[in-house]
Image (tube, rainbow, N blue to C red):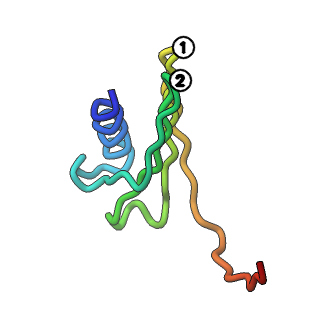
Amino acid sequence: MDKSFMSFVEEKIAEQLGCKKEEVYMVWQCKTLQNIKGLFSSDVPQANGLYYEATYNGDKGELYLDTYKKASNKAIKVDL
């Protein structure tokens, strides 16, 4: 299931970006029971800093694909 999840999501993102499926990559994935969540990205110019969160709901057989763009990246000093 994990490989078919990854392949399906890469295909859908490639369709949105107008690029090859091989130009989309998975950054992170987690599976809990019948649910899978993954973060995906691409280095193609049309991605323009976008990243994607895909969530598969195994109970409903539905895939949710959210698109995000990083707004900021700040370093915060922490004394723990």
With respect to residue 67, does 47 lie above or below? below
Query: Residue sitting at 44 percent across and 52 percent down?
Result: 28
Secondary element at tag 1: loop
Q: Nearer the viewer, residue 28 or 78?
A: 78
**Which residue appears farthest toward the top when viewing the image?**
60
Q: Give the amino acid at mark 2.
A: Asn
Q: Which residue is mark 1?
A: 60
Q: Which residue is mark 2?
A: 57
Badge 1 local density, few (<14 within 10 Å), some, or many (20+)? few
Query: Residue sitting at 54 percent across and 14 percent down?
Result: 59
x, y (%) of residue 12? 36, 37
**Which residue appears farthest toward the right when viewing the image?**
79
Asked if marks 2 and 1 touch (Cβ < 8 Å), the reply is yes
For this view, does 7 lie left or right of residue 36? left
Residue 22 is tagged as none
Q: Give the amino acid at mark 1.
A: Lys
x, y (%) of residue 61? 48, 16
Secondary element at tag 2: strand
Q: Quadrant of residue 45?
A: bottom left
Badge 2 local density, few (<14 within 10 Å), some, or many (20+)? some
With respect to residue 19, does 1 lie above or below? above
> Number of numbered discs present?
2
Query: Residue sitting at 50 percent across and 38 percent down?
Result: 37
x, y (%) of residue 80? 77, 78
Q: CA distance from mark 2 to mark 1?
A: 6 Å
For this view, does 24 lie left or right of residue 30? left
Q: Nearer the viewer, residue 50 or 75?
A: 75
Q: Nearer the viewer, residue 18 or 28?
A: 28
